[in-house]
Amino acid sequence: MLFKPLKAASRNEAYAINTNPGENADVEMRVSWHMDKELVNGKIIYTEVSDINWENAITLYPESYESTAFYGLRFRHYNAVLSNLTPNTKYMYKVGETSLSEPYYFKTSGSESFSFVWAGDWHTYMPIPTRLEGAMAIVEKAKTVEPNIDFFFSTGDIVAYGSDYEAWLTMFNQNPFKEYMWVNMIGNHDALNNVTGPNNDNYFQATHNYPKNGYETQEGKSYYFKYNNVLFFALNNENMNSLTPISVVQDWMASVIENNPTQYIFVSMHYQWFNGVSGNASQYNNWKSFFDEHQVDLALAGNNHVYVRTKRLFNDQVSPDKGTVYIQVPSSDNDRGQVMNDTFSNGDKIASRWTEGLNTIGAIIVTVTESSIRTRLIDRNGRVIDQANIYNQKPIVPVDKATFKESFKVYPSIISEDSVVVTSSVDAVGKIEKLEYYHADVLLGTNYYVKKQDISYTLNNAGSYDRVKVKIYYKDKTVEEINLSVINQDFYKVNNLATIINNSLMYLKWDYHGVSSIEASIFINGVYFNDVDLSEQLVLLEDASVTDDIEIRVNKDSLKGYYNSKYAIYGDVNLNGLIDEEDISLLQKHLLGIENVNIEALEFLDIDSDGDISLVDLTYLHLFINDYVESVDRKKEHTITYLDMFGQLISTETVMTGSSGTYPNVSVPEGYILSGWDTDIRLVKQDLIVQAMIERGETGE
């Protein structure tokens, strides 16, 4: 391997420039750079690489602050967030104030597959420049093995001392940091202080701009992001255990995983899973149960300076089709490698080890497709020393486009009269590129639909609209449109809904307290019947049966009824809507075997709910007709099933016919409020499934 001389640390107007992923790398990237503290008007201009003359470049003036992270130094740290980018697209940018930098580059995620080159533990130290030279050379060599590298990845210890500012500057001036988005995490050396004071992880935060989505006190130090179909975690070992219990970190990770469905999960940290020299377990014991439970596919680490790859492990055993592969990158600085023992522990779990001894240079290329993960260890000459194919352990479930389109609802916000809320099924989260909402041809908002709470999206300044168009951009590059009717608030002002019989004809009747004349749709047994003006408060149900389930839905495209009804007059033997002497006579003949009653009426004759039609039921009719009892309504039990906004069970409730249910308490995501329920639970006459609806608000409870 030929080492290229280092490029000296750049001290132009902008320096320490590097690109980090946004939380959703399909459409977001983050850029970090430094400028002298007096330069308060720094900017970034960026555009697609195809825009060679920068004619369509966007200019952004990001936030900055004066950093005191490095002893005796003061500089302005700029943190830019580039949003609404185009997936699977190469971009370029420049930063500065009056004198802009040379171009830097990155690529957004969104392609069918992607690759990254992973190196680590190169301990940049200016008195020994060959360390950084070796690491940058192996990255360049990786490009000859896999030309389509999408980003650059490391697992820490990329400087010998975190406090060595010149080491950071020199490193960031190397080509890989200019050509790629860079993923990094804190190693023990990155927190080392060789100037004055204690070790700390502020050097890392002062030189990067990672998503501020970590657990408490670790915003921007421990973080997660999504690239294509992978949820990446990058964790700070220097904080875990010493300051924050691992259990707290794992609880945070579990909540992130729950809210961010993806095909794969990669977890990375600095400290090794197994000791590459001896084979002894290290971090593996702290994480194996968590990884099993949450279906982590790849665990990445460094620190030990010896390459280790395990077999796929689940429940502490080798597994052919599920579990986690644990991998450790070797050192890449040609200076701090280790020699392996000939014999080692955990030989049943470890598939491969590799080192060149003290002078080791190696890197790993990881390629991810929809169905598998491929890892390749290369040496300094680009030879593939070890490789593995890891097949997906989660079934690939494509979006059911028809069901997804039918799941949309648009209803008024309870926070603002001038806003509406669009909701849809959680099943498509992470499986589509984006949703765009329009009124006519005016774009109202864009929803990237990557988190579960993204099922709810508020459109501001849209309260007067009666229609909203949704454009669905699928990851297969097809686009579909649907038109939705906005639910008028008066739709919710119906009560006392009942199915009745009058002169042998069946009707649906209700009370209406709204002020608008609005149409809704009647469904019988889930089949569209016709539309009705709610102000009419009555509709004839032609050819309907007393056993039919009747619903009022927002419109004929709705999947579910908000109001539900069913005929429920017990003792009405002749099904004419009345209970009188004729019903007693017919029931007597039925009990004597003289005459069979209408088979549909049998459901309404077991008045005492004992499972048998008998003289007791006949007695109830006599008592009712002679005013000894107020009602003969059978107290039949119905089950109401309550689901949260994601379709998960909250609780169930049993109510008697004609009674009302009670909505349960429900926890909603932080930053959202409960805006209502999708089904009315008054005067229940059948089993119901009821789901919570949310909208973005000021509280999470």
Image: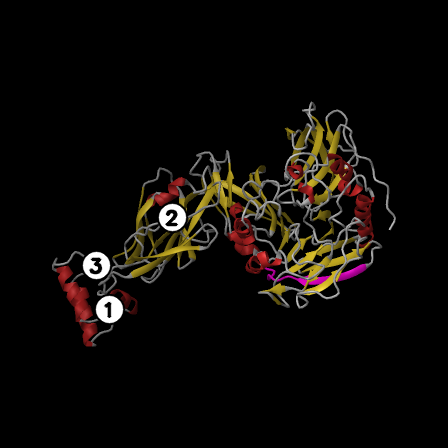
Q: Residue at x 43, y 49 (%)?
A: 692
Q: CA distance from mark 2 to mark 3?
A: 40 Å
Q: Tell me the SS state at disc 2.
A: loop
Residue type pointed to by label 2? Asn
Q: Which residue is mark 2?
A: 665
Q: Tell me the SS state at disc 1.
A: loop
Q: Nearer the viewer, residue 194 or 64?
A: 194
Q: Nearer the viewer, residue 423 or 38?
A: 38
Left or right, 639 with reference to 321 = left
Number of numbered discs overlaid on the protein picture: 3
For residue 252, above or below residue 503: above
Q: Residue at x 76, y 55 (%)?
A: 338
Q: Earlier in the sequence, mark 2 or mark 1?
A: 1
Q: How many residues crowd mark 2 within 10 Å: few (<14), some (14–19), many (20+)?
A: few
Q: Nearer the viewer, residue 536 or 334?
A: 334
Q: Quadrant of residue 86?
A: top right
For residue 490, above or below residue 280: above
Q: Nearer the viewer, residue 59 or 573?
A: 59
Residue 610's label in the rendered image is 1
Residues marked 2 and 3 touching at CB (< 8 Å) = no
Q: Tell me the SS state at disc 3.
A: loop
* Magenta-span inclusion, residue 394: yes
Residue type pointed to by label 1? Asp
